[in-house]
Image: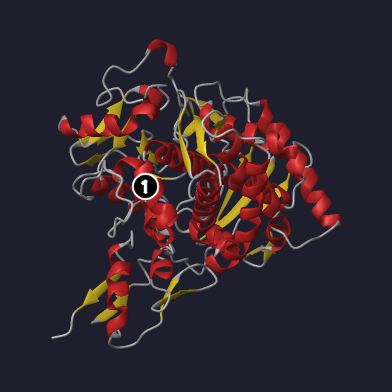
Amino acid sequence: MTDTLDENTTGPDLRIDPETGNKIITWDRNGETMEFIVGSKPEGTDVWQRVPYDAADYGPVADFATDFDHADPAYNPNAPEVWKAVREGGCPIAHSDRYGGMWVPLTHDTVHEIAYDTDHFSSRSVVPGVGRPGDRALPAPIGVAPPITSDPPFHAVARRLLLPAFAPKVIEPWESEIRLLCERLLDEMGEITPGETVIDAAVQYAQHIPVNVVRRMLGFPEQDEAMFREMVHEVLERINEEPGTRQTSNDFGAYVQEQIADHRENPRDDLTNFLMNAELDGNKLGDEVVEGMIILLLVAGVDTTWSAIGSSLWHLAQHPEDHQRLLDDPEVMTFALEEFLRAYAPVTMGRLVTEDVDFHGCPMKKDDWVLLAFPAANRDPLKFEDPDTFVIDREENRHAAFGLGIHRCVGSNLARLELKVAIEEFIKRFPRFELAGDTRWSVGMVRGPREIPVRIIETA
Amino acid sequence: MRVHLDAEKCQGHNRCYALAPELFDVDDYGQAMLLVEGDVPADLQEKARLAAANCPEYAITITENG
């Protein structure tokens, strides 16, 4: 790891002020004690500061090079065409006045450079929208949801806590359980009449897989699946709604605290107890920190993987030659999996500019957003041969679907396993299927199909 | 052929371990570890090239002898 910690740097200590109820984090850095008050309710202008931007003033995007908006409903369905057109128009970095100012690098080199430059581009908030972290929010290098919102050197401390829970050899044993889950979802589709029955590969299949896997890893009750999905949706897709109006987050926080209390009374071998027992510089994490990490894992692990599974099935529905190759030559999955991730990478992340900087001629201002479009980097013709063609056995594929640099997706091994098993089980059960209607795409920074009607042509 | 791993660049993408488990292992944090010292056996050279060509962080390099 590239992060190094100064020996005088210690982890944060979290306590609740009995008088005000405020969460107070003290953090010692090189002998200087820093104290931050975290608002106990995410409302008002203290924690989230309203960005002077109203989507209604702008309307639909006419030119993505100068008025980029990832929340435009036309963006996700056409994103590869948008990236290509903007790049070929001579613009490697798009701009927008929306969200208080936003830059969007669309080439692999510029995405790579920004991901590595944590001095100029902070992860303090990674979801560009109408709210920015305000004065009472945890500042860099911690951010509201470590480690995804953290910068060096604190980032490495928080990340090291999570990494062992998602290491390849810890994730591999989940394969059989994920396979059983996929089989059950396929069974629940009921009677299939080949050539007639239309099912929804997103609604009836893809969306249920990651949420159930993460829920099982956390040891949370099965009946709570729908609540998870709703919470994840509101964080990622409703970025134009007023900060503080997102009631679900507060309810969800209380729910997670109930689960933590239950795990304290009835400890078991799961991710929740792992987090409760984890230590940061010799100190156990406070329940609030555990809650934050659990919500982060859900937000980061559910919508994203569901999108990757959905996009892959959407591709196969339209490319029977790739579908057949996977059936005839299962070994090609090693390469196909990465090609699905390259061509249909679901995740774009945000950064905040820390100080005025000239970035390859772009006059970036402090507090401007940067939208780090890893999916666009994956289709850069300077980096990938024939980038808009899905090459099922592409041998050189340094895709950035899981990010680049210190924030590489901590759940990438789990996501990859879920994607592989979900595709294998679906095509085994349905050796032929085709699109049977309009695909509905997500809105916002996670790209994937939300409805994929497919007609089953053949069953196993 | 020799293969080199720059542990400072590795971010645990796990691509090398998936493509060439004979040459790479991963630790408890998911960081790559090189298993071979010296020349890469002939039957593993193709896998070594694949691992290098798929590392998103350019942490793996190959040098050909001679």
Name the amino acid, label 1: Asp
Which residue, given by chain and number where applicable, does mark 1 sit on? A322
Q: What x and y, as percent, mark residue A341?
A: 40, 48
Camera-nearest residue between A170 and A330: A330
Residue A157, above or below A379: below
Seen in the image, is A459 located left or right of residue A93?
right
Q: What x and y, as percent, mark residue A282?
A: 66, 67
Quarter of the figure with the N terminus of chain A: bottom left
Q: What x and y, as percent, mark residue A452?
A: 50, 30
Camera-nearest residue between A425 and A196: A196
Q: Is residue A355 visible?
A: yes
Q: What x and y, as percent, mark residue A45?
A: 57, 26
Quick one: which residue is furthest to the right in this view?
A: A265
**Total label count?**
1
Q: Mark 1 lies on which chain?
A: A
Quadrant in the rendering for residue B57: bottom left
Q: Is residue A350 visible?
A: no
The residue lying at 33 percent from left, 59 percent from top is: B56
The residue lying at 44 percent from left, 64 percent from top is: B12
Camera-nearest residue between A239 and A40: A239
Secondary structure of the residue carrying tag 1 is helix
The residue lying at 43 percent from left, 19 percent from top is: A53
Quick one: which residue is furthest to the left in this view?
A: B66
Quick one: which residue is furthest to the bottom in this view?
A: B38
Q: Pointer 1: residues within 10 angstroms few (<14), some, or many (20+)?
A: some
